[in-house]
Image (cartoon, rainbow, N blue to C red):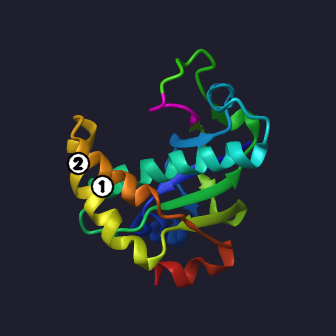
Amino acid sequence: MRVYIPTTLPRLAAAHEAGELGPAPLDAFGVTPGLREWYVSDDIEELEYAALTRAAGASLRMLAGEPAAARRRVVLVADVPDAQVSFDPDQPLDPAVLGAVRLAGAIRLAKAAAVHVDADDAEQDVAAAAAILGAADQGDDDARFTVDGAEDHELLWYGMQELPGLIA
């Protein structure tokens, strides 16, 4: 299964040094039956994009808890054996948990497929969204608008060979 693992630049740098992202279990996102049902689509690229978007949202949540981290959402992409992925097949169609999976093992970076990261020009919007995420969760419409503004930025794709330049 292709999985999308939310992280931050400091966590990615630590993973680069260690050679793996961990420790397990790791929370990630993938194309689960619930995600397929919610999006009513058979287009795998569209469904994978939805899982990537959910992982980017989880990365934003991580940033809210890491004030010293660069204000850029980060998602590591990896293909893992199905046996290492678990999810609740009876999970309700709650938009907050669609596509959520748990990985039983750490992810070796040598086996990762790519990493997606916000461009520099997204940092201001991501910083504002991370700072106000709690208010958005409480139903503040202005805060939700700010969070949505960060989500409007597309993550850039980087090959794993580009990782040293990203974390430098």
Picture residue at 75% right of the left edge, 36% below the top: 82
Label 1 – label 2 distance at C-alpha: 6 Å
Q: Residue at x 48, y 69 (%)?
A: 118
- In front: 7, or 43? 43
- The picture places residue 70, in percent across and down from the top left corner, at 34, 72
Main SS, magenta region, reads: loop
Amino acid identity at mark 1: Thr
Looking at the picture, tell me which residue is in the foreground, 148 or 19. Answer: 148
Q: CB atoms at circles 1 and 2 under 8 Å apart?
A: yes
**Residue 112 % position (x, y):** 68, 61
Q: Residue at x 66, y 35 (%)?
A: 85
Q: Position of residue 147 (x, y in %)?
A: 34, 52
Side (left or right) of 142 relative to 17: left
Confirm whether the magenta stretch covers residue 126.
no
Task: Point out residue 125 in the picture as x, y percentages from the top left corner.
Answer: 33, 66
Q: Is residue 100 visible?
A: yes
For residue 109, side relative to residue 10 (left or right): right
* Magenta residues, start to end: 95-101
Residue 155 falls in which quadrant of the image? bottom right
Disc 1 element: helix
In percent of the image, x 42 and y 62: which residue is there? 8
Residue corresponding to mark 2 = 142
Label 1: how many residues lie within 10 Å, few (<14), some (14-19) or many (20+)? many
* Quadrant where the N terminus is found in the figure: top right
The amino acid at mark 2 is Asp
Asked whether, in this view, residue 40 is left or right of residue 149, the answer is right
Depicted 56 relative to depicted 118: above or below: above
Residue 19 visible in the displayed image? no
Q: Mark 1 sits on what residue?
A: 146
Give the number of the disc on residue 165: none
- SS at badge 2: helix
Above or below, 159 against 150 in this view is: below
